[in-house]
């Protein structure tokens, strides 16, 4: 689960690492990045705690830390994540950090070692010894003395600390990024926090305002020792019958009556919460999801920073000149290989992809999962970073299965695997006269009536803009022309279809992202 949360953080961070697409080309040296992340940092009952931290004081690199210590019983968390990522792009280098928790509960436990008002109120009451008379012994009571620990009994009678949550949350996480966009002279710094399901003392919190609240967790006004019974005093006697209980109660009652009534002040819990903090200077940015401070009867209980991420960048962004830069499809990924499309054409499987400039002129292996990841085709990377080839069509019984997936491989670099059969695919993306034309096909059956197609264009990493709505033809083909962006762009189309003609229920389907760089194609 921690890996899934880390990926979620990094996907959110992609929104911050927006790579604006100026004309790509060769570049000068990149700035130096550092990235730090902490899931949780602070003190609980005076003990310093930071169970998982990533990259503190080190050059940024891609990776994830694992927890090194257990969290105290007071704190519960299903997932703790501290991770970082560096994009080694010669024209648009970037770094980010992500830290946080999921499934968070801070509980107020009865065993907290903080003296409560009841402890102070009964501190002067010493145990009392009462001899057992001969008459009591004749009734079966043991020979000797009764030791009455009135203070312990009163503490047991006082209202215990409730086992409620001081704080609860679904997710508390932060990301911070430093990005070169190909145009600005210095890296752009940005940060954001994700806070979901936050409540303090059972109340949902408005994140637009801070919170400071006091609560009487123990509200016992007074305790009268004369009301104590034999059972409440825990005298260590064997099981007694009703007559014996009456004798013992009569023996101890004068002693209890002589004790004064104990006044117990309330036990006050103070909680302060600050959400979504950001501090920034010329070269660094720190993002914090939450800071929570709590004290009980004036004694510090906890002081925690939850979900902290920090990035810093020193030096200038690369100066981009000329042409021949990274394919637009690689701008929002740290992968060096991307398989863009796989489809059947004229009895063969056509495969198209894009590669990092380091692979220009080199050969890419195309592997097929259903054959045990055997190499089924090879392709040479063109100067613009694209590659294309064909492979034999697999057996009919395999083509539509989940194992009919292809992967582009070069050394240790691998693309994500793509399925051969898709309900919706793009056949071409072309530009002419300031317009972009996108053609494709949806496999039948369509919805009834046919659902509209929504065409979106990526405007930043992780952020898309709806630019057109239109309907496919009855045979599932579609073609749409829109005004081109002034920057290299990636397009994707989505719609809803039926699985079978006899069932009216519809399901979402979409094309793979397809890019077009107006400066290169």
Image: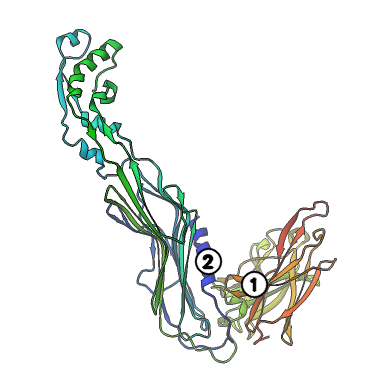
Judged from the image, the secondary structure of the residue bearing numbered disc 2 is helix
Question: Which quadrant is the C terminus positioned in?
Answer: bottom right
Residue 97 lies, with reference to residue 487, above or below; the image says above
Residue 415 lies, with reference to residue 183, above or below; the image says above
**Residue 450 screen position, x and y as percent:** 81, 62
Instruction: Specify the label residue 465 is tagged with.
Output: 1
Q: Is residue 243 visible?
A: yes
Crowdedness near tag 2: few (<14), some (14–19) or many (≥20) residues, C-alpha within 10 Å: many
**In percent of the image, x 69 and y 58: which residue is there?**
402
Residue mark closest to the camera, 2 vs 1 = 1
* 365 relative to 114 in the view: left or right: right
* 323 relative to 9 in the view: left or right: right
- Which residue appears farthest toward the right when viewing the image? 474
Q: Nearer the viewer, residue 338 or 143?
A: 143
Instruction: Specify the label residue 12 is tagged with.
Output: 2
CA gap between label 2 and label 1 equals: 17 Å
């Amino acid at each position: 689960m921690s890996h899934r949360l880390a990926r979620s953080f990094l996907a959110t961070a992609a929104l911050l690492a927006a790579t604006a697409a100026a004309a790509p080309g060769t570049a000068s040296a990149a700035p130096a990045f550092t990235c730090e992340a902490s899931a949780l940092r602070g003190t609980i009952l005076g003990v310093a705690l930071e169970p998982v931290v990533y990259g503190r004081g080190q050059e940024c690199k891609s990776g994830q830390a694992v927890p090194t210590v257990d969290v105290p019983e007071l704190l519960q968390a299903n997932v703790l994540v501290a991770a970082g990522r560096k994009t080694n792009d010669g024209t648009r280098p970037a770094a980010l950090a992500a830290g946080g928790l999921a499934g968070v509960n801070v509980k107020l436990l009865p065993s907290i070692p903080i003296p409560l008002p009841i402890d102070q109120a009964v501190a002067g009451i010493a145990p009392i010894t009462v001899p057992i008379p001969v008459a009591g012994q004749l009734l079966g009571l043991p020979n000797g003395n009764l030791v009455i620990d009135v203070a312990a009994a009163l503490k047991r009678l006082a209202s215990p600390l409730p086992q409620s949550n001081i704080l609860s949350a679904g997710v508390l996480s932060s990301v911070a990024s430093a990005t070169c966009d190909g145009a600005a002279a210095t890296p752009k710094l940005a940060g954001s926090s994700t806070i979901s399901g936050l409540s303090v003392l059972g109340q949902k919190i408005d994140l637009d305002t801070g919170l400071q609240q006091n609560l009487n967790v123990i509200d016992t006004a007074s305790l009268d020792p004369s009301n104590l019974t034999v059972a409440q005093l825990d005298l260590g006697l064997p099981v007694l019958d009703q007559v014996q209980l009456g004798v013992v109660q009569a023996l101890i009652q004068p002693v209890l009556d002589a004790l004064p009534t104990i006044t117990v002040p309330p036990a006050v819990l103070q909680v302060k919460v600050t959400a979504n903090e950001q501090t920034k200077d010329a070269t660094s940015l720190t993002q914090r999801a939450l800071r929570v401070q709590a004290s009980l009867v004036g004694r510090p209980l906890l002081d925690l920073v939850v979900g902290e991420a920090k990035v810093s960048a020193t030096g200038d962004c690369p100066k981009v000149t000329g042409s021949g830069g990274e394919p637009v499809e690689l701008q929002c990924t740290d992968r060096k290989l991307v398989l863009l499309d796989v489809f059947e054409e004229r009895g063969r499987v056509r495969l198209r992809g894009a590669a990092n400039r380091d692979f220009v002129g080199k050969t890419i292996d195309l592997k097929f999962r259903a054959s045990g990841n055997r190499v089924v085709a090879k392709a040479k990377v063109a100067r613009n970073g694209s590659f294309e080839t064909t492979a034999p069509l697999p057996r009919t019984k395999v083509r539509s299965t989940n194992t009919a997936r292809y992967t582009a491989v070069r050394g240790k670099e691998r693309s994500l695997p793509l399925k051969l059969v898709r309900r919706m695919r793009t056949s071409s993306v072309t530009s002419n006269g300031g317009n972009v034309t996108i053609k494709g096909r949806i496999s039948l059956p369509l919805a009834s009536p046919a659902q509209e197609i929504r065409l979106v264009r990526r405007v930043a990493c992780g952020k898309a803009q709806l630019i057109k709505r239109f309907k496919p033809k009855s045979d599932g083909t579609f073609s749409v022309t829109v005004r081109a962006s002034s920057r290299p762009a990636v397009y994707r189309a989505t719609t809803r279809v039926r699985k079978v003609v006899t069932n009216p229920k519809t399901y979402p389907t979409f094309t793979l992202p397809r890019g077009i760089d107006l400066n290169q194609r």
